[in-house]
Image: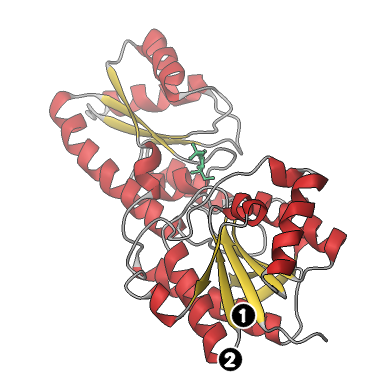
Amino acid sequence: MAKINRIGILTSGGDSPGMNACIRAIVRTAIYHGVKVTGIIRGYAGLINGDMIEMDVGSVSNIIQRGGTILKTARSEEFKTQEGRAKAYENIKKWEIDALITIGGDGTYRGASDLNREYGVPIIGIPGTIDNDIYGTDYTIGYDTAINIALDAVDRIRDTAASHDRIFFVEVMGRNSGFIALDVGVAGGAEAILVPETITDVDKLCDTLVKGRKRGKHSSIVIVAEGDETGNSYEIAQKVKDRTGFDYRVTILGHIQRGGSPTARDRILASKLGLSAVEFLIDGVSNVMIGEINGEVVTTKLEMIWSNKKEIDTRLCRLAEILSI
Ligand code: F6P
């Protein structure tokens, strides 16, 4: 087992609140164990361009409470090519990096895995995305913050919706998944929740809203996941208006869900996973993602992450339906 003297860390894909807490944990755990750390700026693009910095204990001071990522992030097309990865490897050699820790979504690990296959660089992935759509962990870093931001927005919208007797369609993030929509919908008491994992029946949605009106409910909140297969929230809202005549407004929460100070839960998860990633690498474990399942830190082989789909909790769909009668 080759000794790890230096670890490189990068954040890649969409940023998520808690990434900084994770970077802090990695840097401090590594230094605690006598391992040096190189910070790679803008994900794989920085690895290709040699945009890298030496990190010490002080370089991660006062960041645990900050959203975003101090290492910046990017989605690199060049790294998907063999030429791009060859350039990245040159910089890994130049900086004498023995192993990489990559924080991001599953696209992040695919790139890392290619680098491992071609050049043997040990890799550990840490799940950082607000979408929570990563197999091998109950929660991803940033998810808890994102749902709380979205929930706060929904609570505010409910006040104005009630005052004007309107239906609000609130679109939350989740390109391919409904985790955010489902949790925000349940916690926000939404009348309906539309997610890409289930087929949206617009007639049924209209029936629910009409039934609500009949029992004296004059305003409603419909949560729409960005990736819902029916189309975007404006299209869905218009279809409902065409069939029911109900006045509506659409609010797209967008990137507001990705910013701001991470919740305690995200900071703790990020710190745990960051510490474990370093200690696993030192112990010779690599090519895995570190996650948390039922409160325990677990490892899952990287290829398992993208060959398995994390399912939403369909019991929550049923609960939301029953409670919105
Ligand atoms: O994957 C995280 C995410 O926030 C998705 O929910 C969203 O669809 C996407 O990133 C937005 O990406 P970008 O910031 O590149 O527009």
Which residue lies at the image location 31% right of the left edge and 60% below the top edge?
A: 261
Q: In this view, does 30 lie to the left or right of 165?
A: right
Q: Which of 70 and 241 is in front in this view?
A: 70
Looking at the rendered structure, the secondary structure element under dot 2 is loop
Q: Which amino acid does label 2 sit on?
A: His
The residue at the point 35 percent across, 69 percent down is 63
Q: Say which quadrant the C terminus sits in.
A: top left
State how far apart marks 1 and 2 are (Cα): 9 Å
Which quadrant of the figure contains the N terminus?
Answer: bottom right
Marks 1/2 in contact by CB < 8 Å: the verdict is yes
User: Which mark, by number, is residue 278?
Assistant: 1
Residue 248 x %, y %: 29, 19
Tell me: residue 250, above or below residue 133.
above
Q: Is residue 320 left or right of residue 158?
A: right
Q: Mark 2 points at which residue?
A: 33
Between tags 1 and 2, which lies in front? 2
Residue 117 in which image quadrant: bottom right
Is residue 305 toward the left or the right of residue 194 in the image?
right
The kind of residue on which mark 1 rests is: Val
Q: Going by the image, does 65 lie left or right of 208? A: left
Q: Where is residue 214 in the image (x, y as percent from the top left)?
A: 28, 23
Note whether 93 is above or below 29 in the view shown.
Answer: above
The spot of residue 19 in percent (x, y) is 47, 63
